[in-house]
Image (tube, coloured by chain):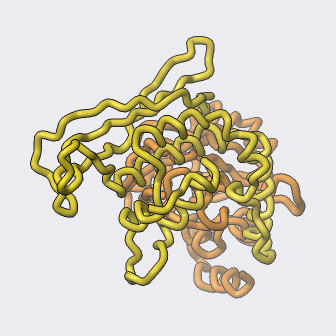
Amino acid sequence: MKTEERRVVEIVVRSQDQANEEEFDGLPVVEVLKPRLIVMSKGEEGEEKEIELPDVRLLGEDGEDDGGLRVHGPDRAKTWKKVSEWIQDIVIDNHPVIQEKRHQNRVKAESSYLYGQEDPELYEWQEDEEILEEMRPQYSSLRNQLVEQIGNPTRSDFAELYPHKYDDPGLSEQARRTVRDLKAVFGSDILIKA
Amino acid sequence: MTEEIKEVEETEEGSILDNLNRRDFIKGAAAAVGGVLFSSSVATNLEAAAHNGQDYVIVSEVVKGSAGSVGPPCQLTSTFKKGEQIVWHAVLFSGSTGEKLNDHKELMDRGMKVQVELENGDTVDMHHSEHPPDESPKIYYWGGSWKISPGVPTGKMTYKIMAEDDEGRTGTLEMFGDKTVDTFPHVLTIEEK
């Protein structure tokens, strides 16, 4: 199977008034944003593809008469997560240095697997700040668009999306993994306090 | 591993494995890809091939690749997260004699092609090469990988592996439909990351 070369272009957001009487925490859903990621293939034809991202529901603020809206946190978390995954797929996974490091990981892991060697120390792309800083300008416009449309993700967005099963302080493993990837992709300042 | 090999030799005497060059198999590809489980698979797969008149018997395993891996790569698993890489390993045997077919030059001379076909219609070409790629001693087997895009739906996914040479001789490892065929893992699970 051939891997198609692509680049991320922009995020477009359409909105739709909410007809159903859906509520979260007693607040009505008044609008639903439908963000799409636009991806362009790098071939001569440069075909454009629209990728559906998770819907983001906007809630009417309690007691607000001026039409103030609040983004439903878990929806925002899902959208940031999905955009982060697509950037990993399209940009980060194709960086030659990361590919070479992963090849080295494979050699180490196969040697360990085949010959019972000790667990090797493996490269983790999330910790390679030098390479990540080099790549971020390629998709910084997406970050800005998303911040403008739905706001920065917050820690509590992820805590709500992936609740900790033991209900003790801190994020669940899935939430921590997602936040780690998100900070690596967009920079550690992407996450703000709620 | 030593004890496992001994167990295979003792318990499978007289089986279809008699037709295999057992020590060579265990030292080579089997040792590389799962020992007892792999050896047992050869027996069931050979029986299935004999029933179905297949020319080639395929024995395979599935591991996690190095790209996008959550946790260490090269681990046997049937559950993958989006962004991870599914890697298939396979070794071929003759359906008629049970002989392991793993000589690189011979396989290339036969024009052997091995391919994984996924439930969604995607295909993955497998390549016969040395593992690990940069170290010795090396072991040959067929390998192919498929990276799980963020757009792939979560849930179960089946696949089959097919082998064919220049003269039209074939072998297929179907994950469903024949209880005598090795069925580990018979279905893969894809989860959100």
Residue found 32% across the figure and 45% down from its top:
A56
Query: Residue B145's x, y, as percent?
Result: 61, 47
Q: Which chain can be seen in orange?
A: B
Give the farthest residue toward the top: A45
In this picture, residue A9 sits left or right of residue B3: left
Left or right: where does residue B48 sit relative to residue B22?
Answer: left
Colour yellow belongs to chain: A
Q: Is residue B182 visible?
A: no
Q: Is residue A24 left or right of residue A117?
A: left
Q: In this rendering, does residue B34 appear at all?
A: yes
Residue situated in front as seen by the camera: B173 or A74:
A74
Foreground residue, B137 or A126? A126
Residue at horizontal 48 percent and vertical 76 percent from the top: A170
- Residue lying at 61% horizontally and 31% vertically, measured from the top left: A2
A76 is higher (above) or lower (below) than B185: above
The image quadrant of residue A43 is top right
The quadrant of the image that shows the N terminus of chain B is: bottom right
Which image quadrant for residue A36? top left
Total numbered labels placed on residues in the image: 0
Give how far across and how far down residue B107 sits, in percent. Answer: 73, 42
* x and y percentages locating residue B137 in the rendered image: 88, 63
Question: How far across and how far down the image is residue A162, in percent?
Answer: 40, 66
Residue lying farthest to the front in this orientation: A65
